[in-house]
Amino acid sequence: MKSIIVKTTLVFFLVVTAEKNFAQSGNFKTKNPYYSRTVTASLKVSNTEWKKILKPELYQVAREGATETAFTGKYDEFDQKGTYFCAVCGNPLFVSTSKFATTCGWPSFYEPLRKNSVVYRKDTSHNMTRTEVLCGRCDSHLGHIFDDGPNPTGKRFCMNSVCLDFVPDSKKK
């Protein structure tokens, strides 16, 4: 009996821990009426509504402009081939061929998938002047852009992993 309780507790712990490591679970996408990888219409959804739908970790970064801790995101040292989508709304953002290795602690890309995949806004928080990168469909905070990236653009789109969903090329067919 004792071993059954220990095993049940361990399984429960592993399930809860695994859930926390993902921006949104597979069930999320059926509960989020705004998530689509094909619809491109702009979304005007209140933060009150997003807060009801999104997991707290994703809401804090995407809707409140927080930043995940460096070197902790699941896509920081990740090199599979595929496409990155907005974890909030499903908007296609980046392809893996534009991702490059950095030492900054966040996944970095040198260009977005399409010109309108992302939009930009001046950010003067934390006594700095930076350019914030937002999802072009839902205006969620993704990260920042810097002028120290590789050719051909010289840009570094420094993104928060929690704001990204990844689909490998093998699953898009």
Image: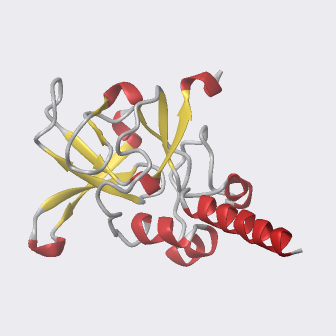
Farthest residue toward the bottom?
Answer: 48
Q: Is residue 64 left or right of residue 149?
A: right
* Colour pattern: secondary structure
Indicate whether 86 appears above or below 139: above
Q: Position of residue 3 (x, y in %)?
A: 82, 69
Relative to 73, say whether 126 is above or below: below
Rendering quarter of residue 79: top left
Percent coordinates x, y for residue 25 in the rendering:
65, 56
In this picture, residue 170 sits left or right of residue 91: right
Q: In this rendered view, identify the residue nearer to me: 35 or 115.
A: 35
Residue 2 in percent (x, y) is at 83, 75
Between 36 and 5, the one lying in front of the other is 5
Query: Closer to the camera, 91 or 72?
Result: 72
At a point 17% along the width and 23% down the height, the residue shown is 152
Where on the picture, by quarter, is residue 20?
bottom right
Q: Position of residue 65 (x, y in %)?
A: 34, 68
| Point 46% across, 25% down: residue | 81
Count of labels in the image? 0
Q: Which residue is depicted at the point 74% across and 55% down?
A: 30
Q: Quadrant of the C terminus?
A: top right
At x 32% / y 29%, what residue is drawn? 98
- Above or below residue 69? Residue 145 is above
Give the left or right position of residue 158, taking residue 154 as reference. Answer: right
Point out the residue furthest to the right here: 1
Q: Quadrant of the N terminus?
A: bottom right
